[in-house]
Image: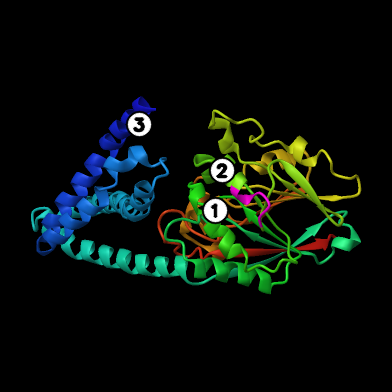
């Protein structure tokens, strides 16, 4: 474990060291009046590095350090990538004019404009992550849907990432908004908490807002696996939230199959936690309609192979940056299924873009989403 962390820190130093040096050096040269501010930001943005080794230790000090320094560290690290790429473009534009002005003189106005755009985007992204909620109504037409399921509503939440600074009022607002849609069932598609099982009671406190008449189910996400999934299961046992771990449950003519998360494959104690479709579908009655929900879009590969009609996941957050009207998100650069509804043969997939945020309260163009899946028979 220690050797792995040392290797990680060495690689990080090789990558982020030069990025930090370039960003700090040129910010101070291009904006000499802001040298002190640049120095303060650079120090704050790198304070997390010495504490990375304890990021998986669940002590009060580790919780506060991760929640306080982590967002600043992540924000500064992203900024160094963006600013270094911006400087490269400015450098290419400066080369034909290098005899007329120094690079710092040439870059001053473009850099100032770039920083203003980032600051405005940061403010809007923070507001979008913390305040509004998007209710996404998604009618899904399905072949062979039993008549009893016509018009049934399934509310989907995902990636709540409940942590130290998660507001109870925000959780209450989320569950109340879901309840106001009068769903037949509510699902939490993984990443309920931000690694640490310590925050499970806070999640349960917010979930009490949901009327007892509405069933509430959840599956593991990768962040439960990064923490302690067994402690999470223990905290949820007998609670308002029923955790499905490769388990199915019948709701009328609907068979709700909850699939575990593939992050379990990296755990030393993985018995019963790796995704298992056979187990989740084993007790399904012949006349029950299967509805699969999991955390990661990877589950859709197996669902397609089995020709299962509908799968719902989360995980991608839409990259916390995107433009919904064009169905573009930062996550789409890396993932084939990143937001919205997809069809592949007889199977359909819906990807919820997240109701919370990970580490950094920023969701520019990707407003937190509550999905209302409305089942419709294909005509």
Q: Earlier in the sequence, mark 2 or mark 3?
A: 3
Reply yes or no: does residue 37 show up in magenta: no
**Looking at the rendered structure, which numbered label has been put on residue 5?**
3
User: Do the numbered discs 1 and 2 sit on residues whose CB atoms are within 8 Å?
Assistant: yes
Could you say which is closer to the camera, residue 149 or residue 166? Answer: 166
Q: Is residue 367 left or right of residue 33?
A: right
Reply yes or no: does residue 236 show up in magenta: yes
Q: Which residue is drawn at 57% across and 51% down?
A: 338
Residue 154 showing in the rendered view: yes
SS at mark 2 in the image: helix
Colour scheme in the image? rainbow
Q: Which residue is drawn at 30% across and 34% down?
A: 9
Where is residue 368 drawn, in percent x and y? 53, 64
Q: What stretch is highlighted in magenta?
A: 235-239
Could you say which is closer to the camera, residue 131 or residue 206? Answer: 206
Q: In this view, does 98 lie to the left or right of 206?
A: left
Residue 336 showing in the rendered view: no
Could you say which is closer to the camera, residue 13 or residue 106? Answer: 13
Where is residue 90 drawn, in percent x and y? 23, 54
Q: Which of marks 1 and 2 is nearer the N terminus?
A: 1
Task: Residue under label 2, please give it.
Answer: 231
User: Do the numbered discs 2 and 3 sit on residues whose CB atoms are within 8 Å?
Assistant: no
SS at mark 1 in the image: helix
Q: In this view, does 89 lie to the left or right of 102?
A: right
SS at mark 3 in the image: helix
Task: Residue under label 1, please give it.
Answer: 200
Q: Give the CA distance from mark 1 to mark 2.
A: 9 Å
Q: Earlier in the sequence, mark 1 or mark 3?
A: 3
Above or below, comparing residue 253 to residue 151 in the picture: above
Q: Give the CA distance from mark 1 to mark 3.
A: 28 Å
Q: Residue at x 42, y 70 (%)?
A: 127
């Amino acid at each position: 474990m220690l050797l792995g962390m040392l290797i990680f820190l060495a690689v990080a130093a090789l990558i982020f060291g030069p990025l930090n040096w370039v960003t700090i050096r040129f910010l101070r040269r291009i904006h000499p009046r802001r040298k002190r501010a640049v120095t303060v930001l650079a120090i704050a943005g790198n304070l997390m590095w010495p504490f990375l080794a304890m990021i998986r230790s669940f002590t009060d000090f580790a919780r506060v350090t991760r929640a306080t320094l982590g967002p600043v560290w992540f924000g500064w690290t992203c900024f160094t990538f963006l600013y270094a790429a911006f400087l490269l473009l400015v450098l290419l534009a400066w080369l034909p004019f290098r005899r007329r002005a120094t690079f710092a003189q040439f870059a001053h106005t473009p850099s100032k404009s770039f920083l203003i755009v980032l600051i405005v985007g940061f403010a809007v992204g923070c507001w979008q992550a913390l305040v509004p909620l998007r209710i996404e109504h998604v009618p899904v037409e399905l072949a062979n849907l039993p008549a009893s399921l016509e018009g049934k509503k399934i509310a989907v939440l995902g990636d709540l990432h409940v942590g130290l600074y998660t507001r109870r009022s925000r959780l209450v607002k989320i569950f109340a908004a879901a309840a106001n849609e009068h769903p037949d069932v509510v699902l939490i598609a993984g990443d309920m908490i931000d690694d640490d099982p310590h925050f499970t009671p806070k999640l349960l406190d917010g979930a009490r807002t949901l009327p007892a008449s509405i069933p509430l189910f959840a599956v593991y996400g990768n962040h439960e696996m990064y923490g302690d999934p067994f402690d999470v299961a223990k905290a949820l046992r007998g609670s308002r939230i029923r955790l499905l771990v490769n388990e199915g449950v019948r709701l009328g003519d609907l068979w709700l199959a909850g699939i575990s998360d593939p992050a379990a494959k990296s755990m030393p104690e993985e018995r019963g936690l790796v995704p298992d479709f056979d187990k989740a579908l084993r007790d399904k009655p012949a006349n029950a309609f299967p509805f699969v929900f999991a955390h990661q879009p990877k589950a859709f590969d197996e669902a397609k192979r089995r020709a299962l009609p509908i799968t719902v996941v989360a995980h991608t957050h839409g990259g916390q940056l995107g433009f919904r009207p064009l169905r573009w998100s930062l996550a789409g650069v890396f993932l084939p299924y990143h937001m919205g509804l997809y069809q592949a043969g007889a199977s359909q997939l819906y990807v919820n873009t997240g109701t919370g945020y990970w580490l950094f309260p920023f969701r520019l163009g990707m407003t937190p989403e509550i999905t209302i899946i409305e089942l419709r028979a294909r005509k």
